[in-house]
Amino acid sequence: MSSIMTSVANGVGEIVLNRPKALNALDQAMIDDMTPVLRDWADDPAVETVLVTSGIDRAFCAGGDIRAIREAALAGDDAAITRYFSSEYKLDQLIANYPKPYIALIDGAAMGGGLGISVHGEVRVVTEKALIAMPETAIGFFPDIGSTYFLPRLPVGVGMWLGLTGARIRGTQAVDVGLATHSVSSASVGDLAAAIRAGTPLGEALSAAEPAPPAEDLPLRAVADYFGGDNPVPAIVGGLRGGDEWAKAMAELIDNCSPTSLFVTAEMIARGAQSSLDECFDRELHAAEQITATPDFAEGVRAVLVDKDRDPSFSPASIDDVDPAVVRRIVGDS
Ligand code: QUE
């Protein structure tokens, strides 16, 4: 086993994510290790419940192994890219269709691929330290891992808001929009995990935990007003620029993103609203293969994760110059 640890006791199969040098970002080996374990447990009478936790302090799982994908893209290794995303999405689908309760305890950052291995499960417990986001537009990618299915099913505008801006939400805010199912205090999450491991029924274990201190209310009216209108990207961005303080802050987040990624994201979320989860994963795989071959992806990952200057030069640099034919090619025709 690479960067995961597994155990079975008291009817509970536990997976501990443990890749501290990369905030548990899911690499190919973790995907390859998790998948057969979960497949086996699905039919194993000794496992009634699956528990997924983090073995490190600051993160549940920061995302995918985006650095390795960039290297593969620059080397022209298309097969490695297809293998990575198809195996990641199969893992997410396995979790979405899991025949037993699947419980994720999120006491830190859960972004991108980290949401893929938690949000599709039946129970997602967050603490006030949980930090949840789909930040892919900043790296020239798009929100994937089945998010083009679940984002358009959140309260009005929330999916488009999170997907376009990469905005982070925390703790109880994730419960408020339906990304998480329960919240407990970070101080009590260790006891909660211990109770679940001991075979305590989940409801009982959750009631015994201290509640998480509530985060401030999300501006759901503003989210609906600015992001909920089925508007094209330029109209959304125009509205934000001419809007209130909060809207201007959101426009600034969008200014750091790949313009092409913004158009791809809006189109993928709009189509996902009409599609099944399986259709969304198929569309995402096509788009992931296409978009990782574009210069914006290599450049975005360079700026955010490799050189960390956070100063990408995307091409085109303006949403006014995005080529609709490029967006169509990336999204595909499904
Ligand atoms: C968008 C992303 C990711 C990201 C930042 C983005 C992502 C990812 C990481 C990440 C963070 C810390 C690490 C690491 C990876 O950051 O997918 O190895 O130590 O994995 O803006 O999609």
Image (tube, rainbow, N blue to C red):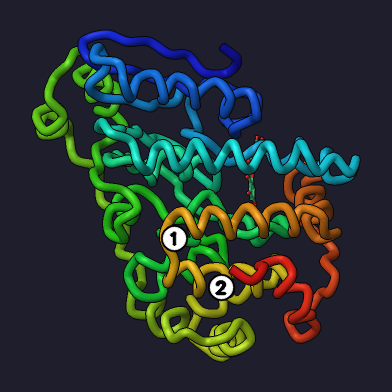
Q: Left of 164 or right of it: where is 137?
A: right
| Amino acid residing under circle 2 | Ala
Which quadrant, please, contains the N terminus?
A: top right
- Judging by the rendered image, the residue that carries numbered circle 2 is 249
Q: In which quarter of the image is ligand 1?
A: top right
Q: Left of 214 or right of it: where is 59?
A: right
Query: Does dot 2 land on a helix, a strand or a loop?
Result: helix
Query: Does dot 1 land on a helix, a strand or a loop?
Result: helix
Label 2: few (<14), some or many (≥20) within 10 Å?
some
What residue sits 48% from the left and 44% below the top? 116
Q: In this view of the protein, which residue sits in the foreground, 48 or 177? A: 48
What residue sits 31% from the left and 48% below the top? 180
Q: In this view of the protein, which residue sits in the foreground, 163 or 244? A: 163
Picture disc at residue 149: 1
**Which residue reaches farthest right?**
75
Label 2 to label 1, Cα distance in Å?
A: 27 Å
What residue sits 32% from the left and 70% below the top? 155
Q: Left of 24 or right of it: where is 41?
A: left
x, y (%) of residue 213? Answer: 25, 46
Q: Left of 234 or right of it: where is 300?
A: right
> Please, is residue 115 above or below residue 53 in the view?
below
Q: In this view of the protein, which residue sits in the foreground, 155 or 127? A: 155
> Please, is residue 307 above or below residue 255 in the view?
above
Label 1: few (<14), some or many (≥20) within 10 Å?
many
What residue sits 33% from the left and 79% below the top? 221
